[in-house]
């Protein structure tokens, strides 16, 4: 399922066009860094779909990671009551100052999102708002660490709407029994309800990346879909189940939680919760993983 998008209102200062983007790059003698995943979006239609999916409003906030030269930031500022962008590349700060000059409620901080105190950032910039969403074109090379940091810090988020590598988006939204389903699918779906917004061809970026992208909306859950007594142990069981995808659940779990002397107990345990030892991790639902982790924990596994 895809989410229909709204057309953005294009104004003279907007940078998300091929000519304007190239003009800014030339004016500032900007050499784009592949190491930072700098690929600037130049398609207004895609921008419209991104901001629409974020469900922003005058009393809501938007946090952007890696604003680049501000193409998405401008569109967020047209809809959100407060916008904060975190940019790691100091060279882009003057450009963003120019781009966002018409929007006094949009600000930029220089920093690495993975090293930023996000709860404090939220307290300083978003206190008193009805809701906050993360909206960003994430660098491919650190997509997963950023999203897991956002989720694990239990921030007061409504949505995470991000443009990421299509392959990673497929894994986040994958269902049990499919080739893309794995520990990332379960980690994301434990915290969120994922929904595909749109596929993004590589041709709408300057410079063009080597792969196609996708925009995915992660609607943050108020409570997880399953109840587990020990969340860390639940994810340890999930990770262990996918260590070697071609191996059976029994073999993966035996290697992680049992010794040669007592691994026969695992087969009995699996049968007791109606899970066949010969199954693979990719076939288990989140509810089955919850039952499995509860049983292993009760058995004394750590």
Image (cartoon, rainbow, N blue to C red):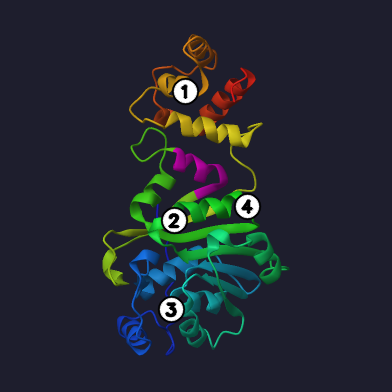
Mark 2 — residue? 143
Q: Which residues are magenta?
A: 183-193
Helix, strand or loop for the magenta stretch, by majority: helix
Name the one closer to the observer, 85 or 213: 85
Mark 4 — residue? 153
Q: Secondary structure at mark 3?
A: loop
Verify whether residue 38 appears in magenta: no
Mark 3 — residue? 69
Q: Is residue 74 above or below residue 169?
A: below
Name the one closer to the observer, 104 or 26: 26
Distance between the alpha carbons at the discs numbered 2 and 4: 16 Å
On the rendered structure, is 22 left or right of 131? left
Mark 1 — residue? 253
- Residue depicted at 34% across the width and 74% down the height: 32
Coordinates of residue 287 in the picture (x, y in percent) = 54, 30
Coordinates of residue 82 in the picture (x, y in percent) = 62, 74
Mark 2 or mark 4: which comes first in sequence? 2
Distance between the alpha carbons at the discs numbered 2 and 3: 19 Å
């Amino acid at each position: 399922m895809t989410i229909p998008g709204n057309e953005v209102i294009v104004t003279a200062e907007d940078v998300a066009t091929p000519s304007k983007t190239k003009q800014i790059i030339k004016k500032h003698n900007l050499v784009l860094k592949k190491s930072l995943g700098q690929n600037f979006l130049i398609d207004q239609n895609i921008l419209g779909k991104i901001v629409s999916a974020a469900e922003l409003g005058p009393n809501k906030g938007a946090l952007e990671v890696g604003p680049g030269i501000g193409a998405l930031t401008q569109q967020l500022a047209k809809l959100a009551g407060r916008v904060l962008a975190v940019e790691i590349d100091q060279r882009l700060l003057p450009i963003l100052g120019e781009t966002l000059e018409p929007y006094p409620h949009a600000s930029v901080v220089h920093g690495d999102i993975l090293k930023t105190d996000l709860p404090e950032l939220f307290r300083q910039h978003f206190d008193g708002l009805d809701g906050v969403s993360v909206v960003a074109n994430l660098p491919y090379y650190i997509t997963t660490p950023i999203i897991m940091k956002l989720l694990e810090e239990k921030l007061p988020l409504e949505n995470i709407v991000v443009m990421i590598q299509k392959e990673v988006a497929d894994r986040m939204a994958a269902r049990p029994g499919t080739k893309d389903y794995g520990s990332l699918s379960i980690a994301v779906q434990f915290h969120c309800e994922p929904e595909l917004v749109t596929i993004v061809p590589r041709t709408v970026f300057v410079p063009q990346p080597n792969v196609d992208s996708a925009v995915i909306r992660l609607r943050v859950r108020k409570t997880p879909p399953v109840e587990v007594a020990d969340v860390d142990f639940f994810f340890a069981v999930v990770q262990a189940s996918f260590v070697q995808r071609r191996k059976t659940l029994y073999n993966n779990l035996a290697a992680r939680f049992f010794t040669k002397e007592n691994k026969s107990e695992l087969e009995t345990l699996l049968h007791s919760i109606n899970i066949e030892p010969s199954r693979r991790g990719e076939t288990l639902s989140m509810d089955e993983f919850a039952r499995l982790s509860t049983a292993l924990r009760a058995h004394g596994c750590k």
